[in-house]
Image (cartoon, grey):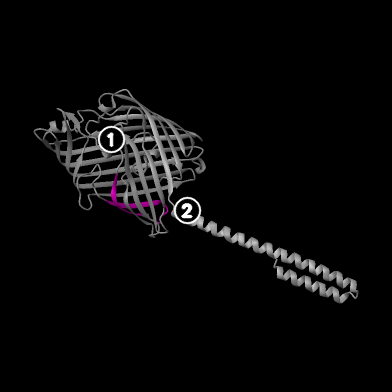
Amino acid sequence: MNLLCVRAALASAVFVSASVSHSATDLEELNKKLDEYEQRIESLEQEQAETRQRGAVSSEYSRRKTTNNLFNPAISVILDGFYASYKNNPEDYRIPGFALGGEAELAPEGFSLGHSEIVFSNNIDDKFYGQFTLAIAEHDNELEIELEEAFFETLALGAGFTIRGGRFYSALGYLNQIHEHAWDFKDAPLVYRALFGNQYFDDGLRLSVILPTPLFLEFGAEALSGRKYPAGGEQDGVGSWVAYANIGGDFGVSHSWQAGMSYWSADKIEREYGGHIHDGAAEVPLFAGDSKTIGLNAVYKWAPDGNYRARNVKLQFEYFNREDEGGLTLLNSDPLEASTLDGKQDGWYAQATWKFASNWRTGIRYDMLDSENTGSDLDVLDEAGLLSNGHTPKRASVMAEWVPSEYSRIRLQYNRDDSYQVSDDQVYLQYTFSIGSHGAHAF
């Protein structure tokens, strides 16, 4: 209530009382009461002024705090480590019909630092979002720090369009866009290991659009440098292209699905595979030519009443087919060995995970590969590991994990790996911890 109104009301009451009463004593008592009321009013006005001042200071502090948070990046750290045990020597690992490159080798045996990350991300302003990711891993007993992601993304283009630019994971396939710490298994599917060296990222631009339809419908295209495996070489301008489409939706409150296809193309590349020791020197297979890859994927999720925290089931499938046309050279061979290459390689995996309790999850996975590579000199292709010699690489995996919260996970995994002719028993015990804020991953 306005204190000025209170003052006026009291004064009116006093004068009315004074006009009714004819006693001097009554008038004196009324005057005393009026003085007391005025003192109380002044005290209340003082308290009100102090309250306003405190509120103004608090409001200014809150405003500054909010503004500062807007411009300070969110920082998160992913701690990943594991213990690995193999029946065979991991250095003997190979996949007949597929010359491996990138980071396709097996993880080291024993205790090791896994794929840890430091992520800086935030909205730059109301138009752009930015993310910067450093990956920390151990290779050949050496600690390596790699710039994994450094991209911007538009927030307000309108009409469902988004542009991403910089270094990022390609939308080639479903799993490729998901960070390694968020995979359902410790290692990549065989087809990712064989074709992409585990995971494919590059520098470039992506344009995508989500159409305003009843179903989720997304189309996108990427123009990339073409300098990263499975492309390679010194490229001027755009060295590789990706086009993709995804469709998905829900039926009922407990079921959701998504299906997609993607296409990758690179011309005049120089893809360098991992070398092997021969006569004291490392002979490194180098493919020079054109390459294209087609991918299909499908994902289904079930959660009772849409509550994924209690229980859920996830089914996942991907298929890739790659064709290479060009020449193959064994670098460091003396005399220099070379052959034409007409390569055809494909593979798929299917997996299922089941969260049967709030803190427990289990899963199974099966992988299979196939290849039909031909050329002018089969001995050169055999030296490069591009002949299958009648072997069909395959692998079966099972895992169980304890998930106390969304920030921590302990996983035990077993692989029966028949990637090459000698079967291997592989066991992993892995921990993954997330410190700080971390954005949600895609469907």
Q: Foreground residue, 216 or 22? A: 22
Please tell me whether residue 247 is drawn above or below residue 36 in the rendered image.
above
Question: Can you tell which mark lies on residue 69?
Answer: 2
Query: Which amino acid type is shown beneath numbered disc 2?
Result: Asn
Q: Earlier in the sequence, mark 2 or mark 1?
A: 2
Q: Is residue 331 left or right of residue 62?
A: left
The C terminus: image quadrant: top left
Tag 2–tag 1 contact (CB < 8 Å): no
Q: Nearer the viewer, mark 2 or mark 1?
A: 2
User: Magenta includes 202?
Assistant: yes
Circle 1 SS class: loop
How would you rate the neighbour count of disc 2 (Cα within 10 Å): few for under 14, some for 14-19, many for 20 or more? few
Residue tagged 1:
104
Does residue 211 show up magenta in the picture?
Answer: yes
Region of the chain picked out in magenta, as a range: 201-223
Q: Position of residue 393 (x, y in %)?
A: 27, 30
- Which of 326/71 is in front? 71
Q: Residue at x 33, y 44 (%)?
A: 148
Residue 23 sits in which quadrant? Answer: bottom right
Number of marks? 2
Mark 2 residue element: helix
Q: Is residue 145 visible to the viewer in this orientation of the structure?
A: yes
Magenta span dominant secondary structure: strand
- Residue at x-position 34% and y-position 51%: 151
